[in-house]
Image: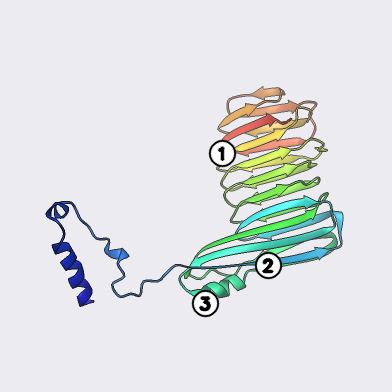
Amino acid sequence: MRMLFCVLLGALAAAPAAAQDDDLELDWDSIDLDGDKPQTLEYSGSSTQAEAGFNRDARATISLPKGNLKVRCHDGDVIRGGLSFKLTGTDKDAMQRFGDGIRLSAYGEGSSGGIKLTVPSQPSSVKSVVIDLNVVVPIAATVSATASRGWVEVIGCKGFVTASAGKDGAFVKGPMTGFKVSAASGDVGVELLEGSEFTKSSAITATKGAVTLMMGLDKSARLDARGTEMHVDHEVSGRISDTSAAGNIGSGGPSLVIRSGGVVKITASN
């Protein structure tokens, strides 16, 4: 320790006069004088679980307490999940125990089932956790997808889709019969594809973010939308202001309720 101080002081004394005139400051926090400053470590892994034998219109439930979720609907009778995770921290053994404790399980058969992610309590030596969960479900399934502390994305489903994100937003796209999409923070996007049999009451909620809904001009709904700004490409038989819209799109039809802490855009898809 004494030798290191001498080296530092000697280096400062030997510096040119012009350099000494500058405001020279040492970042003492970044100097590991004792050689025992914890180093940042990484630990990663992956897991896959599958369960076959589901009906194509099964009720599929996917939930995870931490991480990001992607759901894809496919033309098959399998619900399958795969996860990957990456940890950073300062204790290799604690990180490995935590990572190995992240468990993915598939359950159910026939008319209902799903994927569940279990995450253990995070020790203080684990500084950051990134979990990505990818799931495929039958295309006509009724889907419920929840990412309590992450973002969620559901693509290609023909049934009713419920998607809930704890942060960073949510995006749902497909020829759905209806949807209920929400995010506690972040933006929400919904794209109702051509060929959709849009027949069920639907809702979009972005508590602190913006909302964008894309749907064809041939779609009908009973609209009730509120936000900080309102932009609607479709004709609405009712009342439209700078911050709200209420009335029928087309011939009316299923209820469509939108609540946003930001801008609301209802645009016409091709």
Which quadrant holds residue 79? bottom right
Q: Secondary structure at mark 2?
A: strand
User: Given the image, on which type of amino acid does mark 3 rest?
Assistant: Asp
Q: Which residue is mark 2?
A: 47
Nearer the N terminus, badge 2 or badge 1?
Answer: 2
Looking at the rendering, in which quadrant would you find the N terminus? bottom left
Total tally of numbered discs in the picture: 3
| Residue nearer the viewer, 40 or 56 | 40
Residue 232 in the image: x percent, y percent? Answer: 65, 27
Residue 53 in the image: x percent, y percent? Answer: 86, 62
**Label 1 close to label 3 by CB (< 8 Å):** no
Q: Which residue is mark 1?
A: 261
Nearer the N terminus, badge 3 or badge 2?
Answer: 2
The residue lying at 72 percent from left, 42 percent from top is 173
The residue lying at 17 percent from left, 67 percent from top is 9
Q: Secondary structure at mark 1?
A: loop
In the displayed structure, 232 sits above or below 162; it is: above
